[in-house]
Amino acid sequence: MAEEFKGLSKENLKVAEEIRDTSEQIKLAFNRLNKEGKDISGEFSKIDQLFNKIGRGADKVANLQENIANSSKTTADAIKESNGQRQIARNLQAKIDNLLDRAANSTGRIKKNLEDKAKVLGDARDQASGMADSFDKIANDAATLDNKTIFFNKLAEVVGDIPGIRKFAGPFKDAAAASKKTVLDMAKAGKNATWAQTLKSGGAAFLKSIKGAVKAFGLIGAAVAAIKFVVDLFISANKQSVELARSMGSSVDQADQLRGQFADIRRETGLTRNNTVQLVKAQQALNEEFGATFRASDDTLDNFTFLTTRVKLSAEEASKLSIRMGATQENANLTSDNILSISNNFKTANGFGMSFKGIMKAVSEATGQVAASFGFSNEAIAKGVLQVRRFGVNLQQASNIASNLLDFEQSIGAELEAELLTGQQFNLERARAKAATGDIAGATADVLSQMQNLTAEQRRSPVIMEAIAKATGISADELQRAYLIQGNNNVAADEYYRLLKEGTKDEINAFLIRSNLSEQARKDIEKRKTAEENFTEAMEDLKSTFVDFVNGGFLTDLSEAIKSFAQFVNNSFGESGDRSKAVAESAMEVSDAQIRAAGLTIDEFNKIAAKASLNKGMFGITSDAAFATNTGIDEARKELRRVKNTEIKPDDFTIRQNPKDTLVMAGGTQFGKETNGLLRQLISAVEGGKIINLEGRKVGETLVMSSYKS
C-alpha cells in the first residue's frame, strides 16, 4: 500500500486487532482485581461495556477498510468512531483519577488494590487512544480518496437532489466506487492514479450501470437529462471561474479564493439568493461600476443580492448604492434596514409615501454634487428623497431649484416678476440661505410651499407659469406635475388623519393596505419571490454546491480526463468525444422558442428526442439539436398534426381521416388499400409507355391539362 494510505493497510488492521486482544486481557485482569477487592466499594459494574467497545473497534476498522470504495460516508464514520474511542479514554481517565484519589487516602491492601486498578485502567485508556488513532488514519485516507475521486462523488450527490433525474444518481455512485477501486489498486502496487485513469475506470462503470438503469426504468430521456446536467455543470464551473478572474484582473486561482468567500457567505446567511451564481454577478457588477477591482465585504455582497433579487433594483443601481456605502464605511445591511425604517416612519406620520424600491432607486440616482449635499450618506439621501417627494419633485429637480436660487441676480429678478404677475408676495431669502449651505431639500421645501397658493386660473396661464418656472428653476411642466402629486398626497393625508380620529381599526388597516402604507420588514421582503424565481434560485444554489467545490485549476487539470470520460460514453452510443463536446455546447442553446418555431410542442420534442437519442449518442444532444432543424421530420410532424382528426366538408359529402383507411367519404366510399393499389398500377402503366384513355384523352395529357388549369 502506498505511503499515503496507511489507514487502509493490513498493518493498521493488525494494530486494531492487537488492541482488541489486549483489551480482552485487560478486562480479565480488572475483573480479577475487582474480585480481590470485593469488600472495597466502587462503581465498576458498567466498566466491562467500555472494554467491549474498545474491542469492537477492530471489527469496525475492518468494516470501514472493506467498504471504503463503495461508501461516501467513510470519512464521517471514521471520525465518529475515533471520537467515540477518545470519549472512552476520557471516561477511563476520570475513573483513574477517582481511584488514585481514593488510594491516596487509603493504606495497606486497599491502597494497593486501588493503585493496581488505576494502572490496569491506564492500560485500557491507552488502548482506546490507540484504536482512535487507527480510525483517524482511516478518516485521513478516506478524505484523500474522496478528493482523488471527487468528480463522481459530487455528481452523485448533485444529481441525486434533482427531481426527475435522481434515479440516475446510482450510476454515478457506481462510477465513484470504480474510480476509488482504481486508486486503491494502484496504491497497493505503490503507484499513484492519475485523473485520467480514475475517470476512465469510472466512465466504464458509469456506462454499464446507466445502461441497466435505462433498461429498468425505460427512461432514456431522463438519462439524457442527467448527462446534459453534468455537461452544464462543467461548462458553468469553468465559465464562472474564468469570467470572475477576468473581472477581477486576476488569475483563475486567485478568483477561486474569492469564490471560497462566496461559499462562506452562502453557508453563514443560509439564503439561497446568496448562491455562487448571484454573488459572482454581484462582484462583476461592482467591478464594472467601480471601473476597477472592488473588494466587496461579505455584508456588501449579501445586501447586493437582497437589493437585486428581492427589492428588484438593477445591478447598476445596487452597485451605485454599494460603492457609496463602501466609501463612507456604512454597514450595507444595516443601512438598508435603516432606510426601510425611515420609509415606514414617514408613511406612518404622513399617510402617504414611496415604495422601498422607489426610495432605493432614487437614492442610487443621487450622484455628484447632489449626493455630496447629503454627505454621501445613503440614509441622509433617503430622508431628502422623502422630504422633496412631499412637494412632488425628485432630488435632481430639487438640486436645480437650489442652483437657481444661488444665481442671485436672475433669481431675485424672476421672483419680482412672479410677484407682479400673480399679485402674491414671495419671500425666497430663507430658501437662498439654505441653498448656500447645501440644504437642497430644505430650500426646495421653502420654495414650493409658497407656490401651492396659485389659483387654477393662474395655473392655466402659460405666461404666469413661465414666470414661476424662472423663479423656481424647474420647468412649467415639472411644476404642474409636482402640483398633481402634491394634490394626491394631500388627499391621502386628509383621509388618513380622518380615519385616525374617527375610523375603526379595520377601516384604518384597510386604508393602510390599499395605500401600501403597511409597515414592512426585511423578512417580509425576503419572502417576495415567485415560484419560478424560487425554483431558479434553488437550481442555482444546487449547482453552486458543485461549482463552489470545484476550482479553475481543478478543471484545467481535468480537461483531458473529461475528454476520456466523454469518449467512453459516446463510443458506446455512436458519438466521438470531440463531436460530443461541440454538440454538448450547442445543445444548451436549443430553446423552447426554437422548438415551437419548428412546429412542435415541448412534450412532442422531448418524446421524439428521447427516441432519437437511442440512435444518436448518449448525450442525446445531437438528436435534440438536429431534430429542431430537420426539415423532413419537422414538416412531416407538422403535417401529421394538421391532418389528425381533420374533416373536409364539401357541399355534398364529408372526407375524414380513418385509422384503418387512408380516407373515408360519407356514403362508404373509401380510398384505402384497394384504391391506392389501383392508382399505383395506373401510374406504373403510364410510366411504362402504355396508352390509357380517360374521357377520350390520354391519361398523361389529362394530368398535364389538370396541372395547367390549376
Image (tube, grey):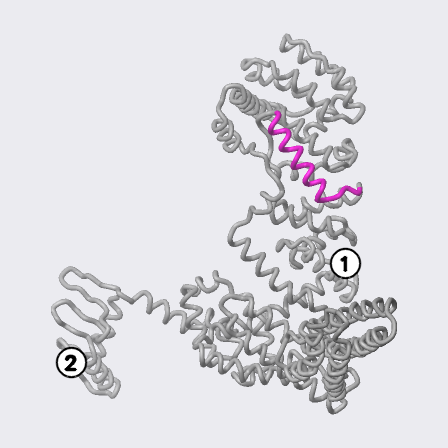
Amino acid carrying label 2: it is: Asn
- Please tell me in which quadrant of the rendered image residue 372 appears: top right
Which residues are the magenta region?
329-349
Residue 214 position within the rendered picture, expressed as x and y whole percent measured from the top left: 47, 79
Image-based side of 628 in relation to 430, left or right: left
As helix, strand or loop, the secondary structure at mark 1 comes to: helix
| Image quadrant where one finds the N terminus | bottom right
User: In screen coordinates, is 21 left or right of 107?
Assistant: left
For label 2, the residue is: 693
Residue 252 in picture, x, y percent from top left = 76, 66
The one nearer the camera, 636 or 535, is: 535
Q: Where, quadrant-wise, is the C terminus in this rendering?
A: bottom left
Q: Which label belongs to residue 623?
A: none
* Amino acid at circle 1: Met
Q: Earlier in the sequence, mark 1 or mark 2?
A: 1
Q: Is residue 472 left or right of residue 703?
A: right
Q: Secondary structure at mark 2?
A: strand
Above or below for 488 versus 343: above
Residue occupied by mark 1: 248
Taking depth in this image into account, of 675 and 589 the one nearest to the observer is: 589
The residue nearer to you, when weighing 396 against 629, is 396
Q: Is residue 51 above or below residue 413?
A: below
Q: Give the spatial CA distance, label 1 vs label 2.
A: 84 Å
Can residue 333 be seen here? The reply is: yes
Please say if 37 is above or below 482: below
Q: Residue at x 74, y 88 (%)?
A: 14
- Residue 468: horizontal and vertical position, in percent? 65, 18
